[in-house]
Amino acid sequence: MRRRLIVKKFGGTSVQDKERIFRVAERCAADYRDGADVVVVLSAMGKQTDVLIDMAHDINPHPPKRELDMLLVTGEQISVALMGMAFSALGIPAVSLNAFQVAMHTTSVYGNARVKRIDTERIQHELENRKIVVVTGFQGMNKYDDFTTLGRGGSDTTAVALAAALRAEKCEIFTDVDGVYTADPRIVKKARKLKEITYGEMLDLATLGAGVLHNRSVELAKKYNIPLIVRSSLNDSEGTTIKEDTRVEGMLVSGVAADKNTTRISVIGLEDRPGTAFKLFDLVAKAHVNVDMILQSIGRDGTKDITFTIPEDTEDECVAILKENLKRLRAHDLDVNHDVAKVSIVGAGMMSAPGVAAKMFECLYNADININMISTSEIRVTVLIDEKDTERAMNAIHDAFGLDE
Amino acid sequence: MRRRLIVKKFGGTSVQDKERIFRVAERCAADYRDGADVVVVLSAMGKQTDVLIDMAHDINPHPPKRELDMLLVTGEQISVALMGMAFSALGIPAVSLNAFQVAMHTTSVYGNARVKRIDTERIQHELENRKIVVVTGFQGMNKYDDFTTLGRGGSDTTAVALAAALRAEKCEIFTDVDGVYTADPRIVKKARKLKEITYGEMLDLATLGAGVLHNRSVELAKKYNIPLIVRSSLNDSEGTTIKEDTRVEGMLVSGVAADKNTTRISVIGLEDRPGTAFKLFDLVAKAHVNVDMILQSIGRDGTKDITFTIPEDTEDECVAILKENLKRLRAHDLDVNHDVAKVSIVGAGMMSAPGVAAKMFECLYNADININMISTSEIRVTVLIDEKDTERAMNAIHDAFGLDE
């Protein structure tokens, strides 16, 4: 009979020193002793990845990406080998595996590969021998038999992909926060930890800068319907479970999030004729800049304005390419403002409840906060406001929707 | 048409920092620009292996050897990735490969594996694309798809094994000395660098503590007849070539070496009957202690003494097991002396020239140095003397055989 299988992922701070390594080992040992099969996914220790990147840049300011991945993957391999030794010290059989040993097949893009396929034979074999299997996060191998890395949030993706391939009961992501909150507790004092949240809500929260999980891992969990649990690596509190909505009476709104890494750009006086928007956003895309909200004014005097938001850290590239092409676009002027922030509410319940957006706008009006732009999806309402109003807006919204209850 | 192929191996001190990494890269680039195919084998940077071992022991004083190898191999992988980046900075195409990527198949013994087979397909393919191939030394993979390490001198072995598998023109071993000397220049001021030496002589010198090359790599080079060149990583001097003897008029003696890591143990009053020596050395072997010289006294009063030498760093284990079993061996007593040293002369020419040993003994007699034990092979004479006399003995022998000429 098959034992239940749990995949547990720990980030770099959770394995940064001996004491924490043993804390992780003890935690996994508890599930193991309880009869479960355990697969542990680890990131590189503490700041090890940054140390390696610095070493690389010292040798070559533009290192070949293939060699950079070859270098970076050693970080996770060190973590898993040491964890293997920690389990052995606790008297628990364990084996560490890197991406080649798993094998974790990815696409070929160095620095930002995607998981394609996982061979589970080796892991299954080790689990059958009642070993805890410790797997390197963040890394894979491509069809050329070279190491790849999975980019930001890569170890979370590794964990979810393994949980899917192994049909795990659940995938636990241990972080330095103890779950997903109705808002950032540093900003909204009354913020409350959520017991459950849907994949969709979490996806919108991740995208909107809540920062707990990278959305690639949530997308993957949603696709394979793997319950994801976000919990603290420092204490035993229950955390937040992310899964398909099963709540009969859900809350209207699950949380409010803000993202200050936003710049608003207005291209003014564009010719009001077909193809203008295409030309503009084609240019922006070629600069590898992601556009978020888009607003187009109604044409007047044969011209129109297009306003859009982009991540603030891509502002320079975007503005540079637009300035170069201002004439070609037949635009009069650019207006750039990075003193803006996106504030969003998400909630699966909002789909079937009218008036949620109106309630949000009303509460911002009551707080005397001006709304620059609005964007909505089925389970989300986002407004662009002045950055200085962010904290006030979040608290006002949190109160208005009674998220502390 | 096939280009000539050179395998170049650099130790940890040669890649310990940015400046040295680029020095190595430039050196390899010169051969590459000269039209040769180049395979570079690297050790871990500086003291990296020691750092990793300390990390392991901090977690677990007795780490599983499989996990220790998994940890240690990251050291060489960091070196080769950084070297790949250095080549790229110089505008030279290069690719780094670890043991899995090569693939370097070894036996299964963790910590002390032996190379069984090397797949050369990947390396050949990269060389055909005119890339410099940078390979992790010291490491392999076993039939379980796990990392192994090759033990002491492992990177030299990797280089020679690759040179053999790829039918390289030669294998250059870069070290912190600039070749093989007639004696240790720190002890014998008149010591002279040898231009050539045979595999056999080098093997005896390696075993005898000259310390330039590990004998496994020399044995391998001898087996596949790969010319080995020992040279300095710090300057361009020619170094010493190790190959089959082709000299018509060889020197009688090529060098003199000393080994102070020696303990002499006498087991006194053993019963003089068959099986005594077997029982004694079976015990020693079970303690994993290598026995070097052996001397058995002529039986007298029904008892005999057996004297042998072992590496001084295994003295404790050896003495402990002998003391435990003294009664079972029916021996009276143990005499242990670690203030002794082995001094040896080696020379392929000595096979066909009588009187070499006598000349050595005479010169020690003239220097008033007492000989404890004697052992000889076809191309070697070794004497055990008091450790305090080592330097005097070496200089006297060096002079007597005119090695400075």
Image (cartoon, coloured by chain):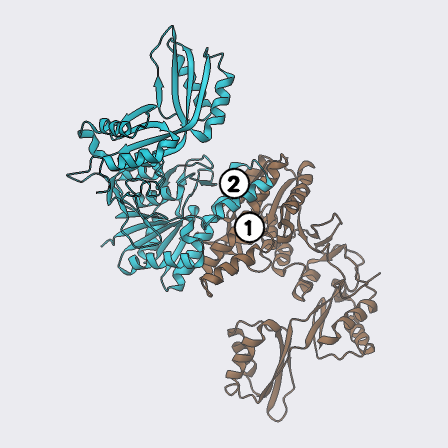
Chain colours: A cyan, B brown
Give the letter of the chain under mark 2.
Answer: A
Dot 1 and dot 2 within a common chain: no
Q: Residues within 10 Å of mark 1 (few under 14, many from 20)?
A: many
x then y, percent, for residue B152 = 58, 60
Question: Number of numbered discs present?
Answer: 2
Q: Is residue B273 left or right of residue B239?
A: left
The residue located at (35%, 43%) in the rendering is: A186
Tell me which corner region of the image, top left, top right, bottom left or bottom right, holds residue B274: bottom right
Tell me which corner region of the image, top left, top right, bottom left or bottom right, holds residue A201: top left
The residue located at (43%, 27%) in the rendering is: A338
Mark yes or no: residue B150 visible: no
x then y, percent, for residue A360 = 25, 29
Q: Secondary structure at mark 1?
A: helix
Residue placed furthest toward the top:
A301
Q: Is residue B340 above or below residue B67?
A: below
x then y, percent, for residue B177 = 71, 56
Tell me which corner region of the image, top left, top right, bottom left or bottom right, holds residue B343: bottom right
- Mark 1 against mark 2, which lies toward the viewer? 2
Residue placed furthest toward the bottom:
B301
Q: Secondary structure at mark 2?
A: helix
Name the amino acid, label 1: Glu
Image quadrant where one finds the C terminus of chain B: bottom right
Q: Tell me, for residue A68, which label it has, or none.
A: 2
Q: Which residue is mark 1?
A: B76
Q: Is residue A154 above or below residue B280?
A: above
